[in-house]
Amino acid sequence: MNQEFTDQVADYLNELRVAKGLSKNTITAYRQDLKSFGLFLTKKGLALAQVDHHLVLDFLNQQRLAGRATTSIARQVTALRRFFAYLLQEKVLAHDPMANIKPPKRRQHLPAVLSPEEVEVLLQVPDQSQPLGLRNQVLLEVLYATGLRVSELIGLKLTDLHLDLGFVQTIGKGDKERIIPIGEVAIDAIDRYLNSARPLLVGQQKTETLLVNDHGRPLTRQGVWLLIKGLVRSAGIDKDVSPHTLRHSFATHILNNGADLRVVQALLGHSDIATTQIYTHISKQRLSQVYDRYHPRA
């Protein structure tokens, strides 16, 4: 590989590590992406100063023809854009070959969603006669009733509950506080958990967190993920379900029942309504499925 290119990449990655403080995984990914481009240059017999807009497009097209995933190519574009911006800043190059080169559009993957019937089956799984079963019931009810992110769920404190007024408060992304209504069924489950199960689980521990494990300590993201995977298996649901699936299901079901998109945006804590609009695609997909199933001439 061209020695000049190799040296510049080494200096750039050192800059990322020392000055920018990027993670080891990010730097490793950038190193691999830039190495691919360096090998491409070597095969062409070209130096850094000869890189132009058309050459970069040629490289990206070659990656596409080689079967690289769209997400991988998008990351390569980012890596190259930042690398060449660094070379411009250091006055190694006088032109930017990445000008007007945009990453390929990623295909929009619709998130997995449970049907209302599947949610009902899942909510019947926890054994509410046991402390951990009642805790699991609260976990499911709150996720489905509020659409909270798992980080918001495990961060819920007793002082965030305003059950007499019918809402909970949380701090979401960007440290933005939001108020979320919560239904009577979830409130009833929380009341029973607070009055009977939680004191037994907490014991002598001192914690203000709503949901705790069997040692009285706050649940973790991984703990919630494992719990939901186990509950889904017990429910006999053959879908790849995660805590976020209940958030997706919450949004989809209330949209299907006529909720305004702006209201759903506020409930989910999305800063951009474009993020919320993916749920309208899910609703339309559901309409198509119903049509195909029930229309006699579909």
Image (tube, rainbow, N blue to C red):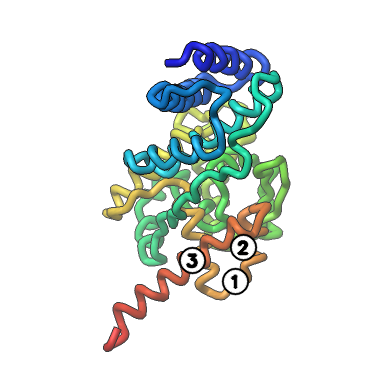
> Which of these two is toward me, 224 or 71?
71
Closest to the observer: 8 or 220? 8
Q: Please name whichever residue, 64 or 162, is drawn nearer the observer in this view of the structure.
A: 64
Q: Position of residue 64 (x, y in %)?
A: 38, 42
Question: Residue 223, relative to residue 248: is it above or below?
Answer: above
Local crowd at mark 3 within 10 Å, few (<14), some, or many (≥20)? few
Q: Which residue is mark 1?
A: 259
Q: Secondary structure at mark 2?
A: helix
Q: Amino acid at mark 1?
A: Ala
Q: Say what amino acid the circle numbered 2 marks.
A: Val
Residue 246 x/y as whole percent? 47, 54
Q: Position of residue 206 (x, y in %)?
A: 62, 27
Q: Dot 1, how many residues are within 10 Å of its Cα: few (below 14), some (14-19), or many (20+)?
A: few
Quadrant of the frame with the N terminus: top left
Q: Earlier in the sequence, mark 3 or mark 2?
A: 2
Decide: is 83 above or below 135. above
Does residue 227 appear in this view? no
Query: In the figure, 42 relative to 112: above or below?
Result: above
Q: Earlier in the sequence, mark 1 or mark 2?
A: 1
Tell me the CA gap for discs 1 and 3. Answer: 14 Å
Q: What residue do we see at 68% from left, 26% from top?
A: 94
Categorize mark 2 by other alpha carbons within 10 Å: few (<14), some (14-19), many (20+): many
Q: Quadrant of residue 78?
A: top right
Image quadrant for the C terminus? bottom left
Q: Give residue 219's position: percent from left, percent from top.
A: 51, 34
Q: Verify CB contact (< 8 Å) between mark 1 and mark 2.
A: yes
Q: Which mark is residue 264?
A: 2
The kind of residue tagged 3 is His
Count of number-bearing discs: 3
Disc 1 from disc 2: Cα separation: 7 Å
Determine which quarter of the picture holds residue 121: bottom left
Which residue, given by chain and number where applicable, does mark 3 sit on? 281
